[in-house]
Image (cartoon, helix red, strand yellow):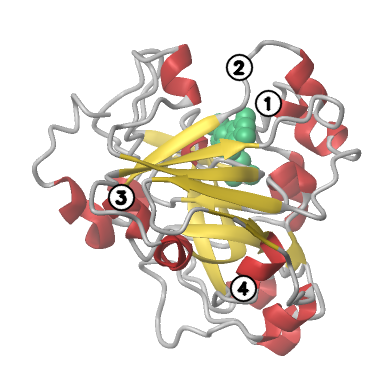
């Protein structure tokens, strides 16, 4: 079934519809930010930092948009910023299929007209032991899942990135078995911390950060945050993921941030926050233990890394 984007919501309109979370957010890093300030597409970190604790100041817009991994644009951390200029994230549609009552191909604008856009300031901890604090705008993945009405047999969700070698020069090389794929267990996907992000710093999502829509799962290593998503598939079995397929002894399906389980080639006990000199301790589940530890109480985390 093809649903055409009849109700187009301009980006500014849905930014103004954002729900504002009240109270302290220092532990879960859920930010409360005034919409009037953000609507100006401000890149001033102090807008966010007034709500943050001393330990977790947001990274600059410059840091976030010029240093990251997005192999579709090249394998160096400067490549996504340098090589993503030709990518066209508009218009965009997402295919939702597999074990659902309502399979659909839906225009992103249509999705955005039906969900609640929120500000979520999250730590991101990469498997390569660097980290950032990023102010995202997005909506809970659970909202989209509910729209699709998964069958009770659906136990996992798989995500697929777009394949456009003409716009994504890195896809002309066989570094990864394209398209990039990732997955979550259904309860992880439904957790309120899990979002599909469509913007950062009040800007539309920059191409290099996964325009127009990418996953953010703040208690997992960065490689779980799949970018430029075109397909969301519901499955009864654990899906293959790109990094696990490449090197299963190094990258697991779960990829939970865990300072006690080292990567075979380096320690995961500490990390370097981009912009800082001194390394800091990595927190269990990236600091979101209170919110997500219950999901893994029956799992041996050294085996299911
Ligand atoms: N499609 C796609 N998604 C991807 C990647 C990629 O190469 N391709 N790299 C991952 C890795 S390894 C990291 S660390 C994060 C980093 O991006 P961010 O800083 O924009 O969150 O994106 C992840 N998502
Ligand atoms: Mo990464």
Quadrant observed for ligand 1 in the rendered image: top right
| Mark 3 lies within 8 Å of ligand 1 (Cβ measured) | no
Q: Is residue 108 above or below residue 237?
A: below
Q: Residues within 10 Å of mark 4 (few under 14, many from 20)?
A: many
User: Where is residue 152 shown, x and y percent of the image?
Assistant: 23, 53
Write down the residue under mark 1: 71
Q: Quadrant of residue 179?
A: top right
Mark number displayed over residue 48: 4
Disc 2 or 1, which lies upstream in sequence?
1
Badge nearest the viewer, 4 or 1:
1
Q: Is residue 175 above or below residue 304?
A: above
Q: Quadrant of residue 299?
A: top left
Q: Secondary structure at mark 2?
A: loop
| Mark 2 lies within 8 Å of ligand 1 (Cβ measured) | yes
The residue sitting at the right extreme is 86
Badge nearest the viewer, 3 or 2:
3
Q: Residues within 10 Å of mark 3 (few under 14, many from 20)?
A: some
Mark number displayed over residue 135: none
User: Where is residue 64 shown, x and y percent of the image?
Assistant: 69, 49
Contact (CB < 8 A) between labels 2 and 1? yes
Disc 4 or 1, which lies upstream in sequence?
4
Q: Residues within 10 Å of mark 1 (few under 14, many from 20)?
A: some
* The C terminus, quarter of image: top left
Alpha carbons under labels 2 and 4: distance apart: 36 Å
Alpha carbons under labels 3 and 4: distance apart: 31 Å
Disc 3 or 2, which lies upstream in sequence?
2
Write down the residue under mark 3: 186
Residue visible at 39% across and 35% down in the picture: 270
Q: Nearer the viewer, residue 276 or 27?
A: 27
User: Where is residue 31 shown, x and y percent of the image?
Assistant: 51, 75
């Amino acid at each position: 079934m093809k649903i055409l984007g009849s109700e187009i919501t301009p980006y500014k309109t849905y930014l103004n519809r954002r729900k504002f979370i009240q109270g302290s957010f220092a532990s879960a890093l859920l930010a409360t930010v005034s919409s009037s300030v953000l609507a100006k597409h401000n890149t001033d970190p102090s807008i966010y930092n007034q709500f943050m604790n001393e330990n977790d100041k947001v990274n600059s817009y410059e840091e976030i948009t010029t240093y990251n991994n997005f192999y579709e644009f090249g394998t160096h951390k400067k490549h996504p910023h340098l090589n993503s200029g030709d990518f066209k994230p508009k218009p965009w549609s997402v295919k939702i299929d597999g074990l659902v009552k309502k399979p659909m191909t839906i225009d992103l604008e249509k999705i955005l007209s039906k969900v609640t856009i929120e500000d979520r300031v999250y730590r991101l901890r990469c498997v390569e032991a660097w980290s950032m604090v990023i102010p995202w705008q997005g909506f809970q993945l659970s909202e989209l899942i509910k729209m699709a009405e998964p069958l009770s047999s659906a136990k996992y969700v798989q995500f697929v990135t777009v394949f456009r070698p003409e716009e994504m020069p890195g896809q002309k090389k066989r570094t990864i078995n394209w398209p990039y794929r990732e997955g979550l267990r259904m309860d992880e996907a439904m957790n309120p911390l899990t979002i599909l992000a469509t913007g950062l710093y009040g800007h539309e999502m920059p191409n290099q950060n996964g325009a127009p829509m990418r996953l953010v799962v703040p208690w997992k290593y960065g490689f779980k945050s799949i970018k430029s998503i075109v397909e969301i598939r519901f499955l009864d079995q654990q899906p293959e993921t790109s990094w696990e397929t490449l090197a299963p002894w190094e990258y697991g399906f779960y990829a939970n941030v865990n300072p006690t389980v080292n990567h075979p080639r380096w320690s995961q006990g500490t990390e370097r926050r981009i912009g800082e000199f001194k390394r800091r301790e990595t927190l269990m589940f990236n600091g979101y233990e209170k919110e997500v530890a219950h999901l893994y109480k029956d799992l041996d985390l050294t085996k299911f890394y």
